[in-house]
Image (spheres, helix red, strand yellow):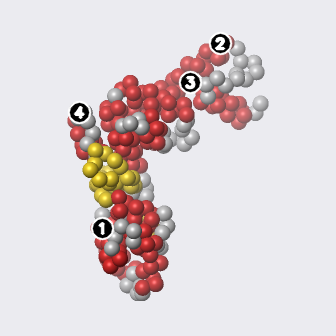
Amino acid sequence: MSLVELQQEFMDQVLTDGRTLPCGWDARMAAGLDIYRNAYRSTMVEALRETFPKTALWAGDHAFSQAAAHHVITHPPCGWTLDLVGEGFTETLAGLFANDPDVADLAWLEWAMHLAFTARDCVALDAAGFAAATSSYGEADWAALRLAFLPSLFSREIGSDCIALWRALADEEPPASARSLEEPAACLVWREGLIPVFRLTETLEARGLGVMITGGSFGDLCVALQAAVPGDDVAKTAGTMLGKWLADGHILKVV
């Protein structure tokens, strides 16, 4: 067995319970592997706890530990840095806490803030720069307009007020219950300077943002709004969204 194969086999043994031991491994080596595997998983669970401190506080220590251990076993990290150990944890919590969607909403908020903080630095396009880039646009050019957004911008539709919950947990004093939203909403997260910030918005804006973040044009955005906005107001609504994204510093450039 080559060194690369030996390293891969050892990693597979660490990540997988019940895997057949390699030929030549005795009981002493198997016991040592169990110790190593437990230490590895404990480290991953603690890394998740540090990444999602408010979610851990809200879910409760025991429930969070179980969920984190389940995630580490079923979705072992494949990145080179502990910064990415939380990938997919929101989805894991959504499945484990199906009757308490506020847990996954809060976890998503913490994860989005984490990713926003570690995203690469970029200079946002301002209103003057946007005006200069589109000064010669005709109707067809506007319809074909596409934008690149800052890598620190994230959006999710939510069913609970995870922002209010996050703030309530800032002093490590969990409220009696999470506040459900009367109407579906979305949460936007981005970074201003070195500080991750967030705001609630309508799902319509979040869906419109999703259209353009995934490569859609301004014309595609208008089409997406037609089902929810009166025909005469579609272009105005789309333009208002565009202005808000510029004001908040979400747009990187015109592409």
Q: CA distance from mark 2 to mark 1?
A: 63 Å
Q: Is residue 139 left or right of residue 21?
A: left
Hey, which quadrant is residue 148 in on the image?
bottom left
Q: Residues within 10 Å of mark 2 (few under 14, many from 20)?
A: few
Nearer the observer: mark 1 or 3; the answer is 1
Residue, disc 3: 37
Badge 2 or badge 4: first in the primary sequence: 2
Q: CA distance from mark 4 to mark 3?
A: 37 Å
What's under tag 3, amino acid-wise?
Answer: Arg
Q: Residues within 10 Å of mark 4 (few under 14, many from 20)?
A: few
Hey, which quadrant is residue 19 in on the image?
top right
> 119 above or below 45?
below
Q: CA distance from mark 4 to mark 1?
A: 35 Å
| Residue 176, label in figure | 4
Residue, disc 1: 244
What's under tag 4, amino acid-wise?
Answer: Ala
Q: CA distance from mark 2 to mark 4?
A: 49 Å
Q: CA distance from mark 3 to mark 2?
A: 14 Å
Q: In what quadrant of the picture does the N terminus appear?
A: top right
Residue, disc 2: 28
